[in-house]
Image (spheres, grey):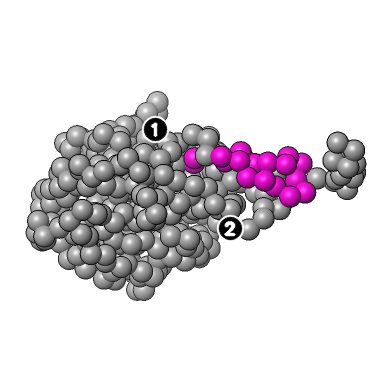
Amino acid sequence: MIKRWIVAACMFTMLGWSVLPGVMQAAEQPAAAAELAPSARSAIVMDADSGTIIYERNSHDKLPPASITKIMTMLLTLEAIDEGKLKLTDKVQASEYAASMGGSQIFLEPGEEMTVDDLLKGIAMASGNDASVAMAEKIAGTEEAFVELMNKRAQTLGLKNTHFANCNGLPADNHYSSAHDIAVMSRELLKHSEATTYTGKYQDYLRKDTEKPFWLVNTNKLVRFYSGADGLKTGYTSEAKFCLSATASRDNLRVIAVVMGEPNTKTRNSEVSQMFDYAFAQYTNHSIFRTGDPMGTVPVEKGMARELAVEAKHPYSVLLRKGAATADIRHELRIDSPLRAPVKVGQKVGRLIVYQGDKVLSEFEVEAQQEVARATWWQLFKRAGAELFS
C-alpha cells in the first residue's frame, strides 16, 4: 500500500520496507517530476536500498510485462543457489520443450547441456526464452511447477498486481504485472550482488570454445551508454510494447526505474535516462550499514550459541533530498519476540528502525546470515549448572 505524505518546508519523509516485505510508502513527489516518462503507460522510480518511491505514475496498473518476467526467473535461480539447491557449475540439459521456445533465444538444441552460469548469461543478456525454460525445469522439474514458485514468491513480496503464467514473458492469458511490482522484484534481485555481473555486461559469448560460438549482446543498451547503469531487463511484445526495468548507481545511490508500454526503444531509453538524471540530481543516500557490516547481536534461547551475530546482507540506507540535515539520524535493532533455536539462514529476526530525532524515517526487516542449532539436553544442563555456581 502506498501512502503519500505532505512534506513541510523544513522536513522530509523517507520510508522503506515496512514489517511486510514489498509494502513501501512514497516520498512526496515534487511538481518538477510530473513530466517524467510521458510516453510510457506506467512508470516508477525507486531507491533500491530503502524502497522509497521517488516518482510514480499509473504504477499499479496491471499490464503485460513481456520479458521483464525474467527478473523473477533470475531471482528464484539466485535464491536456489543461496539455499544450496543449485551451483553455478551445475549442468542443465535442455528438453525438447525448452528448445522449442520462439522469440528471443540462445538456440538451445534438445539434449544440449549448458551450465547454470551460462544460462544466466543467456537469460540476462540475450533474454533467452529457451534458457529461461531450461532453468525453470532444472529447478522445479517442469515449467508449470516453477511458475507456481514464481507466484508464491510474488505473494511473499506483497505483490498485489502480479500473476505469472510462464517463466519467460511470452504472451499468455492471465500473465500480468505492474511497474510498482516489477520495481519491488528488481529491488529483491539486486540484494544478490552477483545479479549485476550478468545484467551489467554489454557483451559476452556462449559456447566460446566450440565450433558454434554464440555472441551475446545485451538487449539493454543503457549498460553501455548510461554511466553507472548495470541492469536489469528489457521486454517487448506487440501487446506490451517496449518495457524496461533499469538500474544505475552513482555516489552510493542506486536507483531502479521501470517503464511499461513505451512506443519504441529510442523513447524508452531516453525517458529512463531522464528518470535517472532526475533522481541523481535531486537525491542522495545516507548510509546506515553497508553489505557485510556488523549490525549487532541477538540473544538466542536454547541455542548451541547464546548469541547470533547479525550482519548486513545488503546495504541499508535512507533516501534524502540533497542538502537535508543528517546530524540527528540514528538507528536501533529491535527484536520483535524472543529468538529461539533452531535459527535458519534467512530467517527474520527483527527490524532495523532508523530515526531522525523521534521521527521514524524507515524500517527494514533483518535476517539471520548464519544458522544456530538447538542445544542438546546435556549442553543445556551443563550451562544451567555453570550459571548456578557462577
Q: Secondary structure beneath disc 2? A: loop
Residue 77 visible in image: no
Q: Is residue 135 left or right of residue 385?
A: left
Residue 302 in the magenta stretch? The answer is yes
| In this view, 65 is above or below 202 | below
Identify the residue at horizontal 47%, vertical 66% (top origin). 155
Residue for point 65% across, 49% down: 344
Compared with residue 87, is residue 80 higher up or lower down, i.e. above or below? below
- Rendered residue at 30%/47% (across/down): 319
Secondary structure character of the magenta stretch overall: strand
Name the residue beneath numbered marker 1. Answer: 207
* x then y, percent, for residue 266: 10, 49
Residues rendered magenta in the picture: 296-313
Location of the N terminus (image quadrant)? bottom left
Q: Which mark is residue 336?
A: 2
- Mark 1–mark 2 contact, CB under 8 Å? no
* Above/below status of 57 relative to 330: below
Q: Quadrant of residue 253?
A: top left
Q: Residue at x 15, y 61 (%)?
A: 40
User: N-terminal of the two: label 1 or label 2?
Assistant: 1
- Location of residue 11 in the rendering, given as x and y in whole percent from the top left corner: 24, 54
Does 324 lie within the magenta span?
no
Q: Amino acid at mark 1?
A: Arg
Q: Position of residue 383 (x, y in %)?
A: 85, 41
User: Where, by quadrant of the figure, is residue 4 drawn?
Assistant: bottom left
- Type of amino acid under label 2: Asp
Residue 368 appears in the picture as rendered: yes
